[in-house]
Amino acid sequence: MKEGVSPTDKRNLILAFESSCDETSVAVIEDGHKILSNIVATQIKSHQRFGGVVPEVASRHHIEEVTLCIADALSEAQVGYDDLDAVAVTYGPGLVGALLIGVTAAKTVAFAHNLPLIPVNHMAGHIYAARYVEPIEFPAMALLVSGGHTELVYMPAENEFEIIGETRDDAAGEAYDKVGRVMGVNYPAGKTVDEWAHQGHDTFKFPRAMEKDDNFDFSFSGLKSAFINTTHHADQIGEKLNKQDLSASFQQAVVDVLAEKTQRALADYPVNQLILAGGVAANQGLRERLERDLSSNPTTHLVKAPLKLCGDNAAMIGAFAYVAFKHGVFADATLNADPSLEFDWVADPVK
Amino acid sequence: MKILAIDTSNRPLSVAVLDDSTVLAAITVTVHQKHAEYLLPEIERLMGMAGLKPADLDRIVVAAGPGSYTGIRIAVTTAKTLATTLNIDLVAVSSLATLAANVPVEGALVAPLFDARNQNVFAGLYRIKDGQPTAVIADAHTNITTFLEAVKEYAEPVWFLGDADHFTELINTTVSAATPRISPWLNLPQVATIGLLGQQMTPVKDVDRFVPNYLRLTQAEAEWRAKNPKEDVESYVEKI
Ligand SMILES: [Zn+2]
């Protein structure tokens, strides 16, 4: 220990694991907000061969990568097992066979080095990617948009999460992948559709679902059907539609629904911050729209998860794990994957 | 040498800890198949009984498949993570050989098999030589009749182990040589036995790249390879 440094000044180091879908990731995080390392091995190229994530293939790849990621994370952070304070791992939601590899590896490391084990909800991790921008000020709201989830999460205080609205059918990211496929874009289609959208115009005026309903839920299946019908009809009459305009029209509808519902939620739940997180939070159209909407809001300011941390990664898991650590949230060696893990719903989301 | 041996290839969970040729403690549980939940707690209990800490271990021996995909994944992930994180050796043994090792009869032919549904099995044929199972027909995922026809060629009594009782009739009609009666005890993996074998075996060279022996491609992968025979099948995962 360095001279003049008291034991209470010791930095907290967490070795965090993430393997819920198609990325194997291990990170070393200091005090919940400093990334010492964040190793991500992505399987995207493998699953692109099949047009989407194949769970059994994902699980097999995780086993190939997991111990290499541990070694790389420790060496890049220049720390050893003796320096660590805890091990953290995503235990849900996600693909069960994929989650199990991270959970098993994390439990094993915790056992081998007698370290406490912290169970982390993947969605809490996504929200805490924002912690790398600035501290979270409660109460806060998160708009979580990813391939598997679209939800509004109210956070009255640290370590408290309440869902106030979610998608009733497809997640936003899922809808992106489906319309991408129709336009011949391989999974994951979000980035390409986003780029095309910026080159086109909303000429098709697709429906905006449930904008007027008195709740904070989302729906994208109607929009998806309208999109497919439009392109299908054009195919039948041999008309070639402009992909840029199709993308712009689709994206505008998605962004309108997300932004409108978020505004309404913010009116009912005054918060200090709106956190935009999840894989689809990398979408430029969505980032720009929320920036514009929030610029005129005197009390709530927008915190966007860093672009590099929007996708799945262990750094975000480590950020939330630090909060769980402080709150004494630990698991024992029986920790299992929970593929359908969810935040609790707020008792009465509609006032 | 302190050895931890692990087998969760099928329904039974079997763990043992040895000091050279002394079995210090062994646990075999058959009442559930919650390996993800119970493997590590059982290892903790086992090590506690033996009065050992993880850092005392010198070697991990794992039954690496074939078997239930989830089962062999849990065992291999636990084993390779332990070996790398403690910087000790990893030895891999066939899950079928683990069963074959239960037969203490020198010179016996042993056919351990696991039911893989639709008349398919994971099976191999072993000869007990110097007390150790030695493969004479390599472990494979195969049709049960094809396997039995190959076994029949040896025209010797064969000890059928594992899920053999799912195929009793077929075994009786296909393999003419008398098949010894098997005590149900022999159908359970007794991982202490492979712990003993694992002392002499050569450790895995590249533990990080070690994977379970699935003996089957995923359906998606098999179809893709059939359609893309010339494509590279390695390097599809990349660090970003
Ligand atoms: Zn995610």
Image (tube, rainbow, N blue to C red):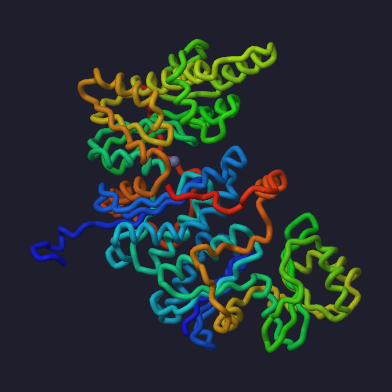
In the displayed structure image, the side of residue B236 where residue A256 appears, left or right: left
Quadrant location of ligand 1? top left
Q: In the displayed structure, does residue B184 sit left or right of residue B209?
A: right
Residue B69 screen position, x and y as percent: 62, 58
Residue shown at 68%/77% (left/top)? B185
- Residue drawn at 77 percent across, 59 percent down: B120
The relative height of residue A6 versus residue A274 in the rendered view (above or below) is below
Residue A85 location (% of width, % of height):
28, 61
| Quarter of the rendering containing residue B194 | bottom right
Where residue A79 sits: x, y (%)?
29, 62
In this rendering, the answer to whether A275 lies above or below A125 is above
Q: Residue furthest front?
A: B230
At x 68%, y 61%, the residue is B215
Percent across and percent down for residue A115 are: 34, 64
In the foreground, B202 or B176: B202
Question: Which of the 4 image quadrants contains residue A106?
Answer: bottom left
Residue A118 can be seen, yes or no:
no
